[in-house]
Image (cartoon, grey):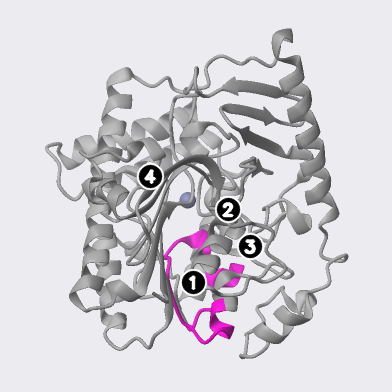
């Protein structure tokens, strides 16, 4: 068992996993390690994936929305270990120019909005830049801009022009590559089908209705309109249909490995980068909140030699690749701060937020997370503490799984609160003191990752090893 396949599913909540909507993933309970309480490192793509691939906290080293040194990505290490590396992400935030393609021999990241089809990445960036300028322009009244946005969204959905590559197409591309793939290899596939807008391939609803339901959600964002209960239920329904679709793609990919005889030599990791809110805490999408619907994620690790086990302790994505490396006997770099989640007994989990983002493809990835906006969730046993710059919340997830009863103001829980305040202080100090200037890359890693030619991307010159 040497090949590694990482499957990340965008915006997939833990509680979307069920026999009805994810029959394939649910069945994996009997095939390997099934984690009931796994947490992402943040509530949105960029910081979450940065942390997972580099086994570091997003707020470290000045707070990153991209992979830059001294963070060392799993693909870089595996490449130096002689792995062939192949990535299919197609997510604008996971673009190679933000460092996510580091260490990959082949990395497919191009955004493929249907009306931008056929253009190079740089032409797409220019067009997106112009759209952003117009959109941000104070010359156009906000109402008009919002109206144009909603019209555009409606038309795109009705015409099925979605800004991502559907999972079944990704699978076709992956299968083509697998035919002549040298072993061992590391493959990363990121499915975006569960991300908003929710547009099922097949549904009883008309395209007009599907578009209207999605647009209603955006009206809540743009005009502060209240959301009708029926619309909310329809949104959830559409999301679950998308979940079912993505489960099929995961099943199709894993089964293909069986067909071509690679299954027994491969370890598969299936997880999501974060969840999705459906008004549980007064909002939609995934940003600036760290409640369960956003950071509690599915996590399954399967492989021929792994015994099946359901693990109910809290675990974090920061420990994911240290665990996989231990299972496969690959030495971990000193730069990774995560531990083997199967041996680590402390099970204190941290998840972070550091900046408001805009829920569109227009996030400026050159900026850093701002520690003064930092919000940190800490989980220990059944307790969860969420601390913002001027807020503090405490929940007992066993008695209150929906986090509706904040216990922070209750003096009865003073001792628990004090313990969490200490953990928070220590964590903040840890991330604050981890600055790039203070960091000395270990000789071992230096030797390992300079073994191959690594392109230096623009803006990274000062971060060279
Ligand atoms: Zn995401």
* Image depth: mark 4 or mark 2 in front: 2
Distance, label 4 to label 1, CA atoms, is: 36 Å
- Above or below residue 3? Residue 411 is above
Q: Which residue is mark 3?
A: 66
Q: Which residue is mark 2?
A: 343
Distance, label 4 to label 2, CA atoms, is: 37 Å
Front one among 238 and 400:
400
Q: Which residue is mark 1?
A: 328
Distance, label 4 to label 3, CA atoms, is: 22 Å
Q: Residues within 10 Å of mark 3 (few under 14, many from 20)?
A: many
* Quadrant in the picture for the C terminus: bottom right
Q: Which residue is mark 4?
A: 196
Question: What residue is rendered at 36% in x and 66% in y?
Answer: 305
Among numbered discs 3 and 2, the one appearing first in the sequence: 3
In the picture, measured across the screen, residue 44 lies left or right of residue 55, that is: left
Distance, label 1 to label 2, CA atoms, is: 15 Å
Element under disc 3: loop
Front one among 122 and 107:
107
Cβ–Cβ under 8 Å for marks 4 and 1: no
Cβ–Cβ under 8 Å for marks 3 and 2: no
Element under disc 1: helix
Distance, label 1 to label 3, CA atoms, is: 27 Å
* Image depth: mark 4 or mark 1 in front: 1
Q: Residues within 10 Å of mark 1 (few under 14, many from 20)?
A: few
Cβ–Cβ under 8 Å for marks 4 and 2: no
Among numbered discs 4 and 3, the one appearing first in the sequence: 3
């Amino acid at each position: 068992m040497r090949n590694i396949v990482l499957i990340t599913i965008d915006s997939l909540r833990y509680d979307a996993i069920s026999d009805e909507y994810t029959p394939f993933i649910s069945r994996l309970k009997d095939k390997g390690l099934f984690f009931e309480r796994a947490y992402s490192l943040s509530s949105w793509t960029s910081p979450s994936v940065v942390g997972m691939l580099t086994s570091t906290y997003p707020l470290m080293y000045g707070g990153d929305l991209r992979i830059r040194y001294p963070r060392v990505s799993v693909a870089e290490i595996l490449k130096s270990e002689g792995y062939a590396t192949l990535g299919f992400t197609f997510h604008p935030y996971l673009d190679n120019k933000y460092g996510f393609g580091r260490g990959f021999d082949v990395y497919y990241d191009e955004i493929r909005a249907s009306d931008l089809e056929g253009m190079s990445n740089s032409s797409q960036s220019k067009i997106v830049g112009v759209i952003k300028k117009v959109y941000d322009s104070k010359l156009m009244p906000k109402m008009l801009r919002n109206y144009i946005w909603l019209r555009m969204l409606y038309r795109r959905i009705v015409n099925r022009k979605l800004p991502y590559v559907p999972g079944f197409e990704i699978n076709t591309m992956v299968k083509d590559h697998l035919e002549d793939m040298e072993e061992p290899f590391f493959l990363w596939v990121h499915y975006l089908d569960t991300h908003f807008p929710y547009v099922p391939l097949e549904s009883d609803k008309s395209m007009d209705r599907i578009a209207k339901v999605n647009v209603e959600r955006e009206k809540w964002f743009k005009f502060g309109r209240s959301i009708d209960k029926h619309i909310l239920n329809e949104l959830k329904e559409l999301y679950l249909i998308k979940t079912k679709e993505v489960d099929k793609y995961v099943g199709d990919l894993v089964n293909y490995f069986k067909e071509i005889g690679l299954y027994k030599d491969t370890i598969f990791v299936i997880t999501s980068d974060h969840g999705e809110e459906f008004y549980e805490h007064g909002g939609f999408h995934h940003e600036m909140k760290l409640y369960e619907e956003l950071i509690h994620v599915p996590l399954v690790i399967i492989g021929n030699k792994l015994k099946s086990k359901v693990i109910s302790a809290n675990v974090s994505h920061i420990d994911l690749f240290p665990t996989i490396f231990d299972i496969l006997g690959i030495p971990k770099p000193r730069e990774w701060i995560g531990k083997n989640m199967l041996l680590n007994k402390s099970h204190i989990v941290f998840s972070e937020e550091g900046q408001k983002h805009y829920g569109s493809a227009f996030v400026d990835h050159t900026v850093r997370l701002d520690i003064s906006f930092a919000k940190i969730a800490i989980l220990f046993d059944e307790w969860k503490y969420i601390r913002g710059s001027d807020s503090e919340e405490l929940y007992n997830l066993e008695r209150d799984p929906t986090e509706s009863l904040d216990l922070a103001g209750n003096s009865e829980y003073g001792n628990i609160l004090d313990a969490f305040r200490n953990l928070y202080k220590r964590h903040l100090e840890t991330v604050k003191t981890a600055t790039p200037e203070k960091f000395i890359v270990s000789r071992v890693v230096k030797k390992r990752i300079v073994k191959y030619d690594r392109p230096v991307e623009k803006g990274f010159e000062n971060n060279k090893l």
